[in-house]
Amino acid sequence: MSDLLLQTESLSVGRGDRVLFSGLTFAVAAGELVHLRGRNGAGKTSLLEVLAGLRAAVSGTVARPAGGLHWLGHKNALNGDLSVYENLGFWCALQNCDPSPIAAALERLGLARLRHRPSRTLSAGQKRRAALARLLIAPRPLWLLDEPLAALDVEGLAYVGRMLDEHLRGGGGALVTSHQALPVDATHVQILELA
Amino acid sequence: MLRAFAAALRRELRVAARHKGDWLLPPLFYLIVVTLFALGGKPNDPQLAAFAPAVLWVGGLLSALLNLDRLFRADYDDGTLEQMFLAEHGPLAVVYAKLAGHWLLGGLPLALLAVPLALQLGVPTPVLGSLLTGLLLGTPMLSLIGGFAAALTVGLPRAAVLLPVLVLPLIGPVVIFGAGAARAAAAGLDAAGPLYLLASLLVLGLCFLPLAATAALRNSFE
């Protein structure tokens, strides 16, 4: 895959007994952001789930990077009874990564003073930021982000933009679904439209 | 994998500590059900003592079902399940930890509570050892079979209604051997046979049911 982080070949994706699309071939190279767009129900989330390895494709192949990937779905993977810090600590144990960067990641996303609060007391935007903190805790070459901007305020959008720009400058790649324009340097961005 | 198992078990216990009602409800329900049997019978009725093992086993089984549908539900709803499946060593360690947590917070208290409840039903003291050993071997099977059923139904609406229908037939052999061990001891016979069979079922369950639960959970993404 040389500098390619993700490559698909004739990919068909379905949900239930319905094929959403077929014959999709594309790649994400190092330093590249692919903005995945499409109408509601076109299969953006299903495609990302297949690329992450959560679901099987109907047919076709997916080559993923050896260094692993980050998955941020619609859901934030935060247990409401646990604090933000406890949730991220548990995630670190799952990923077998060092938990020491958690504090710095939360600081950077403006959540430092909320880190010991139960997640259920946070606003939707704060929860989204806490989920995004995972991207900073353990470096991974490929980010698969499903509507990462949902519920974020202007400050949150700026954080995500900076995170994506730094990730791409560092040789990472990302595939992002969003109905909004992505707050990043436009030279990195390729558009992939699902019909 | 050990790190993931320890972290997941700690997380289960921590969440339970913040939701005391969730794990206090099954023992309370058990206490009420068995006490109603004692109140419904005649004082010092030998029939009550004869039926006590079955009452204690079925009461424990029904109590353990009370919070079963929540075993994977919260993780499914909040997206943690997705992160579990993308974990470095896969989800199996977390599934084992969740089943262990369910037994520690559900099955173990029920097994221990069965001893005073058995005395209340007039079970002779020499039978208590077989009864407790049977429950200590059988209640983990409730968590294992129940966990598999909870994993199968995690993505379905109204799973709580479906769960007993799935679990109760599968748990039949455990109840038969568990109550059988106590009945054998009450009749002055050797209870080792049914207890060995329970132990064999537990070993098989520990080997295969978490794998089956993991496969069922993966299916919830489809």
Image (cartoon, coloured by chain):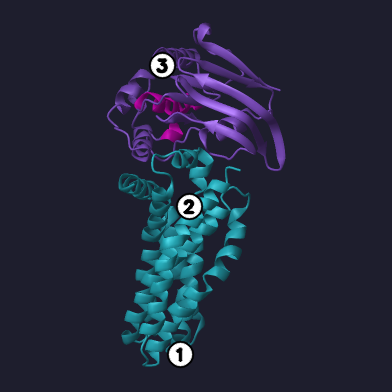
Chain colours: A purple, B cyan
**Gap in Å between the C-alphas at discs 2 and 1?**
39 Å
Residue A186, given in percent of the width and then of the height, sits at 53, 7
Label 3 neighbourhood size at 10 Å, few (<14), some (14-19), many (20+)?
some
Label 1 is placed on what type of residue?
Asp
| Distance between the alpha carbons at the discs numbered 1 and 3 | 79 Å
**Which kind of residue does numbered mark 2 sit on?**
Leu
Q: Position of residue A60 (x, y in %)?
A: 62, 34
Q: Is residue B103 left or right of residue A14?
A: left
Q: Horizontally, is B195 left or right of A123 in the view?
A: left
Direction from residue B15 to residue B64 in the image, left or right: right
Between B90 and B27, the one lying in front of the other is B90
- The residue that disc 1 covers is B45
Q: Which mark is residue A171?
A: 3
Q: What residue type is disc 3 on?
A: Gly
Image spot of residue B26 (x, y percent): 45, 62
Which of pointers 2 and 1 indicates the residue nearer the eye? Answer: 2
- The secondary structure type at the circle numbered 1 is loop
Per the rendered image, the range of residues in magenta is: A119-137
Query: Which chain is indicated by disc 3?
Result: A
Q: Nearer the viewer, mark 3 or mark 2?
A: 3
Say what secondary structure mark 3 lies in.
loop
Q: Determine the residue positioned at 37% across, 34% down.
A: A88
Does residue B180 appear in this view?
yes
Which residue: 39% across, 67% down? B203
> Separation of disc 3 and disc 2 at Cα?
40 Å
Residue A140 is a magenta residue: no
State yes or no: discs 1 and 3 in contact (Cβ < 8 Å).
no
Q: Residues within 10 Å of mark 1 (few under 14, many from 20)?
A: few
Numbered mark located on residue B71 in the image: 2
